[in-house]
Amino acid sequence: MTRIILLIILFPSIIFSQTKSNIVFIDPEDTPAEIIRKAANVIPAGRQYDWQKLELTAFIHFGMNTFMNLEWGRKDFDLSVFNPSGIDTDQWVRILKEAGFKLIIFTAKHHDGFCLWPSRYTDYDIENTPYKNGKGDIVKELSESCRKEGVKFGIYLSPWDMHEKTYGSDDYNEYFRNQLRELLTNYGEISEVWFDGACGEGPNGRKQIYDWNSYYELIRELQPDCIIANMGPDARWVGTESGYGRKTEWSVLPGNIMDTDSIAASSQQKKLDNAFIPRDLTDEDLGSREKILKAKSLIWYPAEIDVSIRPRWFYHKEDDNFVKSPEKLFDIYLNSVGLNGVLLLNVPPNKYGLIVEQDIKSLQGFKYLIENTFGRNLATGKVVFVSSEREGNSAAFILDNDYETYWTTDGSDSTAVIEISLDTIRTFNCAMLQENILEGQRIEKFSLEFREHNQWKKFATGTTVGYKRLFKFDPVTTSRVRIIIEQCRTNPTLSSFGLYITPPSLSFSPANTTFRDTLAIKINCDIPNSKIYYTLDGSLPDTNSKLYTGEIIIDSSITITAFAISSDGKKGLPATSKYYKAKYDVISLTKYSQSYSGGGKYALVNGVRGSSYFKDGNWQGYHGNDLVITLDLKEYKRIRKISAGFLKDINAYIFFPDSVAFYASEDGINFIKLGSKKPVDTNENNAEIQTVSINADGINCRYIKIEAKNIGVCPEWHVGKGSKAWLFADEITVE
């Protein structure tokens, strides 16, 4: 007994390094090898583990912004406009549950300060709207819908409050805690509280110093199993709102977000929360060996990866045509959940209180791709070789469909090879690996290989694995694969391994473009030997539609819709591409931004108008310079009016042109100025479109020239004053 006690006293890190916890402390005398071993034994807390297994979580942005067609809101909305006449929270939950989402987070209060529950602490809430004659409570309605369907419920409570008069003072922290208490005590189990770091001005012109630790303490007291995310100690923001994670995503990070001087090794969870300091964690490298070797402590801090199904977070009707496709959502899944993260997908209802058809169809297609990819693991067979395995943790466990059984190596082996003989020759284009994170995150480098012509060839390589790593690649056909663990922090673990084949997916070359005379189009399929059926009128094709055998030549505006069936009978989702024949020829055009080309040279004469969302792909952008375009009508015409469309979105540094001049010519050389117009600026901050027109009085001409003068730089009153201004143009029409 004496020898054991002395061993602990002399080498405390030996015992501690084998203790698994969601936080470990680095002793000044720890060697690099000891620090790496400690990192390998950091594991998630129970709530973090349960949250990670959800994989798919949903956000619902809904509120005054929905009715005012805004994103950031205002402090002084007329509450009488809020009356979602057809609201159906059961529909929200049913649609998201059917698509595979297991938790829904609701915007109980956004930055404008308007509360979607009757709060005792403000009159800027749902009680003072026409909705249900002031008796409504959408937080309650949604929480009850979630419970009925077995879906977890969470809340977003904006720390920034444009309306509340105490914002910017110590009293606001008490106000915020009071509202948190209402939400955490009156609506059953709250599985996640989601904070962002928004900190703008309040009605008094001041910004707030948030008492984060008191918020965390209250949440732990009232909802101890709740995840505190983003600006909280349980889960962090990945760093973008694109839905894509890092290729190397560590859940074990240096404890730089903890005030380690105030933490003792015996601290309990409450004290650890109180030591949490929200900080920017958006660097590309957060948890490499280089980072952790400099740390004073190491914590389990996984990534949540957020994105909206639409271009923006609240519903805007003009975004209906820009809902992310099922294929895009599937790619996001592969690069969020499949990169050791949890996906948080926003699906905003419209002002009637319903999720609209475009979003529903996309979610249904997403579910179809998930189920028809991962419904069958092709890695069935048996392990024929493993370089090392510990007794009780054989490599066979990676194929048993049980996450918590796992393989690991014997002794101190930190590299390994596992070879699997499939039950027959298989074709696959997707692979999955999972570590058992209850044992820690350990793998730093690995590769996957297949056997072909008596040679091993790589088909995937990676760094971190974590809870789940997914790959998509060109199809591979083989009967033998192997997993090579090349570098690991200690003994590697694998819980699961899978090989899958996706439904066939189509692409068009070129896609969604404008042409002048004729155009040749190819339809490409990612699964060889698939049959492709298509239509030219936008209708849904079936097996009785045209069979694609080669290039399609078009000479008019059309919509191609196609789908594919692979040789093993898997049916892909329909894909559509639109082609527009230019109405006029473009003789000359000043240089536009390649980032906002609108589809190229003919974007301004293709008959397609842009929406108020400047990233919709239809606008052509000019950064700091003017638009000058000359059109050939191809014949002499007597014209009455010429029009051109322009966008203003001052939040994106986009301004109406200073002036628009119109010219006409018979020969394309000598132009007559028909006049000049200035757009009417309404001084609205919202994005808006304006068409500038001039009467041509029946002049006979063949050529038209338009000069739109950029204002040059952002004005003095603008946040970007002195920066180059953008000019955005879309459709030009000649009547």
Image (cartoon, rainbow, N blue to C red):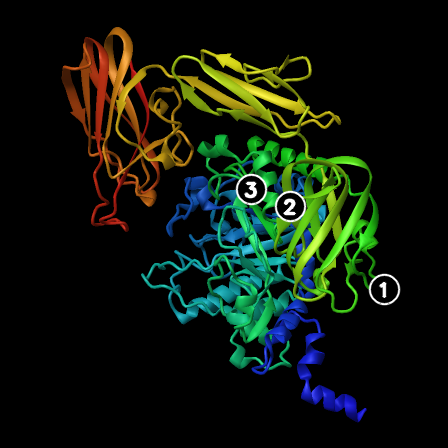
Sort mark 3 into few (<14), some (14-19) or many (20+) by Cα contacts within 10 Å: many
Q: Which numbered disc, 1 or 2, marks the residue that appears first in the sequence?
A: 1
Q: Which residue sits at x=57%, y=74%?
A: 297
Q: Which residue sits at x=64%, y=64%?
A: 223
Residue type at mark 1?
Glu
Q: Which numbered disc, 1 or 3, marks the residue that appears first in the sequence?
A: 3
Contact, mark 3 vs mark 2 (Cβ under 8 Å): no
Residue type at mark 3?
Val
- Alpha carbons under labels 3 and 2: distance apart: 33 Å
Image spot of residue 677 (x, y percent): 19, 26
Q: Which residue is mark 3?
A: 347
Q: Which numbered disc, 3 or 2, marks the residue that appears first in the sequence?
A: 3
| Residue 391 numbered mark, or none | 1
Q: Secondary structure at mark 1?
A: loop
- Count the labels in the image: 3
Q: Which residue is mark 2?
A: 460
